[in-house]
Amino acid sequence: MKFKLLIVTILFSMFCMAQKATVTGLVLDKEYQDEPMAFANVTVKGTTRGTSTNENGKFTLSLDPGNYTIVIGFLGYKTLEFPVTLKANEKKVINCTLEVEGVEMEMIVLETTVTQESVKALLQEQQKAVEIKQSIGAEEISNKGISDVASAVTKTTGITKQEGSGSIYVRGLGDRYNSTTLNGLPLPSNNPSNKNINLEIFSTDIVEYIGIDKTYNYKNYGDFAGANIDIVSKNYKGDGSLEIGTGIGSNTNAVEQDNFYLQDGPNFSGFSNEPIPNNPLSAYNFSTSWDKQTATPINNSFYIRGGDSFSFGETSKLSFFLNASFDNGYNYKEGVRRGSVNVQGLAIKDLNRKAFEYQTNSNAMANINYRINKNNNLRINTMLINSSSQKHEEFNGIIDANGTAQNGGGFIRRSTFDRTYLLVNQLLGEHKFGERTNFDWGVSYNTLTNVIPDRMQNTIVPFQFDDPTSRLVASDINQADNHRYYQEMKDDEIAGNLNVSYKFGKNEEGDYKGKLIAGYSARYKEINFDATQINLAVTRSNFASQPTVDLNNLDGYFNQANLDANFFSLRTFRGDLTNANALLPQNFNGQQMISAGFGAVEYQFNPKLYVIGAFRAEYIIQDIFYDTSLKQGKTLFDTMEYLPSISAKYEVNEKQNLKFAASKTYTLPQFKERAPFLYEEVGQSYFGNELLYNSTDYNFDLKWEFFPKGGEVISLTGFGKYIQNPINEVTVASATNDISWVNSGEKAVGIGAELEIRKDIFSTEVSSDNKKTNLAAGLNISYLHTNQDLDSEKVSRETNGLGVAFTNKDSRLSGASDLLVNADMTFSKEFSSEQSLTATISGAYFSDRIYALGVTGKGDLVDSEVIALDFILKFKFNKNLGFGISAKNLTDPTIERKQDIQNVVVDSYKKGRNFSFSMKYSF
């Protein structure tokens, strides 16, 4: 009986399948001379049924017999509707061409001007891709009120940002394991300490979308284990348009101060560059004041942007997009700052810190796209960024529990102005030769200058070290206690990519099953770093007669008269004027060249299984020459890396995918980490290790994706990392407890899982007047377990005796939080075709993470967990005018760092809440 029932069920299913009708078609893009349009939406009106076009613009829908309306559309294009009547076993063909509709600018981004800005379009691309992809587009960035790229990427699964910097951690892997590109071409770093550029300096105004590859792509450089973050700049479409916008805001901590202080010298715009004075050792020739200046802590922003496009004949089109913006921000932080906490839990330095901060960001971008004809396209990108930060810090308390200000009363002031100037020039081309062969290429020239001009530091102590009530004098403990510091780093880089692809093996539908890819990429950079520190060394032999210092009038002590009176002298690390080379800066310079060839095969083995097998080989040269306070010399490095990778996709059905990726990559030491150069901070110094070498990385990912409908996704990813000879920042066992970089053990392992959910909770539409109401939510969760072994003997053996005594034999990876959570909810309502409202609330959580490894019995430095909450409201008043309100960091959590075994808080502060109001007008 059961067997008969099974036979009947099978026959019935076969009969039903036989009754199905099929709608197929080809969608073309009029904007690009009738090229096939990938990822266009094809839906059945009034139902949740639908699909999207493949990379060749083709689609297939299987439906029951009946009457339907097929809707075909894409973001920024006019939607087309086709009524059809289907009979059993009938196959109907719908071919159409989509046109760009009118352009309308939103408050933050140009919505509808670029197809890949929308959440829906990016999810469609993710679904179709064989590789494991993740992106955040301009639409989502706008809804969440995100102003910089660093904050944008932290809204995606498994990514956090290190507090106080733009450094990104991906699955627990920090700056050294990640890479950054603009339109697929590499970007330089603005900080000698980092491999990647600070993503906070990139305004989201220029972004179409940000691609985040957490699995290795053979077209990228192999210095990778965390993610490649690719910023794709806007590419304008449509008719001419212009938009201007402005905003005003404040940080609650900053505006609550009676006076907001900054250093003398840097201006409001952030374009300052105070030079080293002439003859700085022969006389007191400094033109800027030691004394702090007051400022009004009100944040401002302004932008203007627009574009247009022009057609030439039937096949050529020229479009351009221009953007210019300026924004600034004031912040204030206050809390404890403790240093050199010993095994007994005693802080050698125990200070209260006040930090007044001011940042500026100026952006200008020009993008020109020239569509020569259907088969050839050229694109030019030029971008200029000027980013600056001021930090005026004041420390009060115990400077040295065993010596200077041992019972309190000590005072340290440091004022730092840091400016980055970046010019990016790119030329990209896309060419087609028939229907089988594509040739894509790109070249770039980037020049970056980072300066710290005229950093000021003062150390003022009680005359009687053990009596905090005694009069204050300038410290004579270290000749660098009071100084002016000038730093300049230049990084010039030229890079290029090219690849050729050839399609082969047509299937029954006429689509190609396979593709061969071959390519070459290279980058060459030259870097030069100069640093000069003028120490105002207090004369010890004259200490008893040192005049009292007024903290509100430091110029009253540091002046020509007191220099003439021999209360202090002017000198560098090389000495005073008696040394002819005293003013030669500390310097390191070098070159890095990477030359790479790659090849890949993409093949569709059956209608469900797609595989990409690839191989890349890179030859790497990194040479460094140095003349520093530690030594003179050079360190040369070259290696060959062979990097296989594989990606695969299995389409479970039209809405579900299984994806797999595995690869071998490497991690290269940075210039600063290998140059024996001494970098001095307040209470901490760093020096490079010339014997540092690269790590080898093995990466594995397995992902399940489910796309219930357009704009929705549910996915679960498992991943693993195996790193041989990982590089870590460690404290060296010495009298000064300096920090360096070492290959700290044999291996590090990370395994974890990521969950992402993006879902419409409800959505309504009144078709008669096009009114829509929508409530959507997103959630991503990442869990990570990491472990690395720590081997002091290995470090000593490989560094000719460098002393590192790890407290533990193994540890978590630095910067790795076990748990990361991001959640958001967006409500949008259209009152009419010209009036709408969008409100977004978003929250983030990360669990505690190691900042630095413990040594000599001291505990690890651990950053405590943080919960953050933001609210963004945008109101489009009419066709031209829009307003926005932003409230960020509403929870205002305490940012805290502890030394875990001793359980001592070494750093603690609150960032304050940020509120802003913005307005835009479109022409």
Image (cartoon, grey):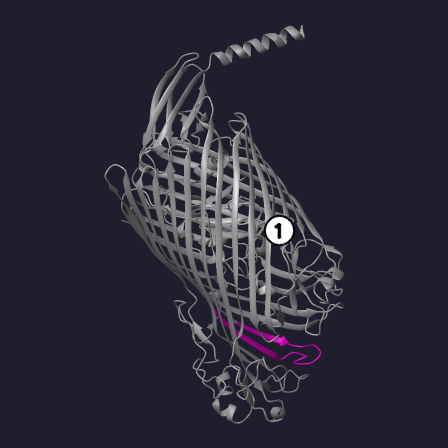
Q: Would residue 580 be found to the left or right of residue 250 on screen?
A: right
Residue 606: percent from left, percent from top: 54, 25
Q: Residue at x 60, y 93 (%)?
A: 545
Residue 228 vertical position relative to residue 409 in the rendered view, above or below? above
Q: Quadrant of residue 830?
A: top left
Q: Residue at x 60, y 47 (%)?
A: 642
Q: Residue beneath label 1, please?
A: 172
Return the residue nearer the eye: 867 or 66.
Answer: 66
Taking the magenta stretch, the answer to whether it contains residue 411 is yes
Residue 625: percent from left, percent from top: 56, 68
Return the residue nearer the eye: 466 or 19.
Answer: 19
Q: Quadrant of the N terminus?
A: top right
Element on which disc 1 rests: loop
- Can I make out residue 892 in this image? yes
Per the rendered image, the range of residues in magenta is 393-419
Residue 203: percent from left, percent from top: 42, 55
Residue 275 vertical position relative to residue 713 in the rendered view, above or below? below
Taking the magenta stretch, the answer to whether it contains residue 478 is no
Q: Residue at x 47, y 33 (%)?
A: 762
